Image (cartoon, rainbow, N blue to C red):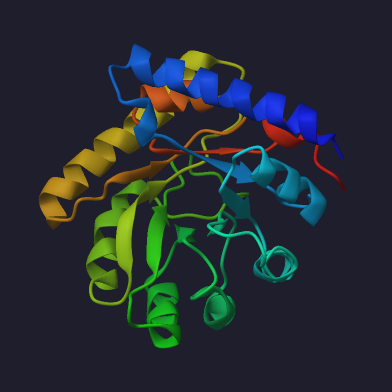
Amino acid sequence: MLAGDEILARLESARTKAASAARRAGRDPSAIRIVLASKTQPPEAIRAAYIAGARDFGENYVQEALTKRSALADLPGIRWHLIGHLQANKAKLAAGAFELIHSLDSARLAIALNRAQSKPPVRVLVEVNLGGETSKTGISPADVAELIDASRGKVEVAGLMTIPPPSDDAVRTRAYFTQLRVLRDRLAVDSGLALSELSMGMSDDYELAIEEGATIVRVGRAIFGERIR
């Protein structure tokens, strides 16, 4: 685990880079939310990041998140995001535990979340598998409109999320981020929903994502260092 002053320095660097990327795109830096991907990080590392000013933390697994949530219950204003895949049979545990669930990928899951907590509706993002990768969850771009329609009245669909295929080619990566933004813009018109959130971009590419419209970036290694196994 990194020392608190190192986490602070890394967080300040990420914020500076995010703000610069927003300004390059003519956007307001305050519209960007950095979610610290804290999978496998101990509560002490999250506490250090909180002390450094972070408030949003993203976990991949419900049970790990609930354990950390309990351990850090004394921290006012901390917000938890589920950024990993959510199975429908875990919906009851997840429904009231997260500020935002980034991984809606089926009407079945929307129904399960509604049954677990119908008021207020659970806020979610539709996970879009832009690269058609069999190793990743999410749905194809062609199926997003149908899922949004099927989710009406069950959950609050706040926007879209994607993880593009890994690549060292910035042009290729940027194209995926552009694709998600264009898809969101079209679906917002067609559905009548704001779909204001775009969760895309991680430690290696969050600046590109912000330039292409991300409102949420999920940054882990750049803040916490290499993941603890």
Percent of width and height locating residue 38 = 69, 48
- Nearest the viewer among 206 and 14 is 14
For the point 50% across and 75% down, the residue is 96
Answer with left or right where residue 153 lies relative to residue 62. left
Percent of width and height locating residue 120 = 33, 76
Counting labels gives: 0
Percent of width and height locating residue 207 = 49, 21
Answer with left or right where residue 1 lies relative to residue 111. right
Q: Is 156 placed above or below 221 here?
A: below
Percent of width and height locating residue 152 = 23, 71
Quarter of the figure with residue 220:
top right
Q: Is 142 placed above or below 147 here?
A: above
Q: Is residue 166 visible?
A: yes
Quarter of the figure with residue 113:
bottom left
Q: Is residue 167 visible?
A: no
For the point 48% across and 23% down, the residue is 18
The residue positioned farthest toward the bottom in the image shown: 115
For the point 12% across and 55% down, the residue is 192
For the point 31% across and 26% down, the residue is 28
Answer with left or right where residue 29 lies relative to residue 169. left
Q: Quadrant of the N terminus?
A: top right
- Nearest the viewer among 219 and 69 is 69
Quarter of the figure with residue 31:
top left
Q: Is 228 placed above or below 104 here?
A: above
